[in-house]
Amino acid sequence: MRDSDALDNNPHVSRSALEAIHSQVYGWALSRCDFEHANAEDLMQQAYVELLSGNARFDNKSSLKTFVFSVVQNLARSRFRRLSTRLRLVKKYHAEAVETSVEAPEPRANGDVWRAVRALPARQRDVIELVFCRELTVEEAAAVMGVSTGTGRVHYDRAKKALRQRLQHWADEE
Amino acid sequence: MMQDKDNKLRDRVSQAWPAAGGNEPAFDAMWLAARQRHEISRRRYRRVAAAAAVVAAGFIFLYAQSPSQETYIEVADLMESTYWTAPSDVLLPQREFDIYQDMPAIFESTIPAGGTLL
């Protein structure tokens, strides 16, 4: 880490270190926002603002990547809570006014695998994304998700098992 | 064996996972936007803090300027009063009585109480 570009309110975080993990964090933010780019960008900006202001203070207890992923996760959660409250209110007064369905993104390849991943419960999907696609360890993934390592391992094992079963089942059907 | 199966699954999932696909914003642009947002919120905080400080200072200034209300005992009021309270009666206010109004009635009473006149 270069000391020269360390943040004023977050001395253990540098601009260059954030730049190095930018695309990984963006991928994580994207999946937090149901793959809507505008929301993901906004979420990322907000995460950077939290780091700049020192509201989210990194103290070297984990890796920077794990920490920034956690910040994004927490912001997404609080945003989701706000949105769901608004949605409930809107639904209450305008039952037909809201379109809630979000288009599933196009997978890069192998639609079956993506379909199997989408069918997983949220936590299992998260741990699979963090470990398989964002290159975190299960321990780090558990920290990002705000669960104990043991719980993280359980989600990870169940997710792998469910994925294998589904893929096997679909392969047998074909 | 297990590790191999995991690696295969990992490869398949990471290949299937949707990528940002060229829509990924550049770090510099995002960092700049975040800095601007941070600056705006800092400025807004400073403005609100300054306004609050001005209001507080104005309140203190006005409060310091206003003459304090003096409380005093009007001697004339005291002299005109026939109302008397025994020092010990402060704790027993129900025993307060007007010496000029009540005492004659007591002295002139003809109601017997326990063998004597009340």
Image (spheres, coloured by chain):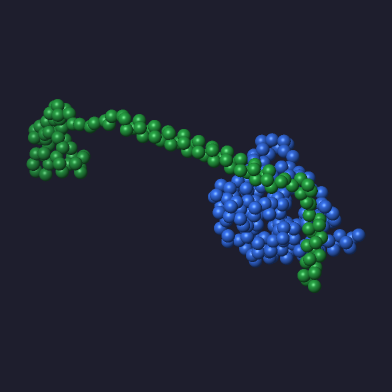
Chain colours: A blue, B green
Q: Name the image quarter holding the N terminus of chain A.
A: bottom right
Query: Residue A26's spot in the image, x, y percent?
Result: 70, 50
Q: Say which quarter of the image contains residue B96.
A: top left
Q: Is residue A73 visible?
A: no
Query: Residue A124's spot in the image, x, y percent?
Result: 72, 59
Vertical arrangement, residue A120 with respect to residue B54, above or below: below
- Residue at the bottom extreme, as displayed: B1
Q: Residue at x 80, y 61 (%)?
A: B11
Which of A103 and A94 lies nearest the eye of the viewer? A103
Which of B101 and A49 lies nearest the eye of the viewer? A49
Residue A120 placement, left or right of B52: right
Q: Residue at x 73, y 36 (%)?
A: A96
Vertical arrangement, residue B95 with respect to residue B16, above or below: above
Q: Name the image quarter holding the C terminus of chain A.
A: bottom right
Q: Is residue B103 visible?
A: yes
Q: Say which quarter of the image contains residue A37.
A: top right
- Residue at the right extreme, as displayed: A174
Q: Residue at x 66, y 47 (%)?
A: A44
Query: Residue A19's spot in the image, x, y percent?
Result: 67, 52
Residue B90 placement, left or right of A135: left
Which of B60 and A102 lies nearest the eye of the viewer? B60
Query: Residue A53's spot in the image, x, y percent?
Result: 56, 47
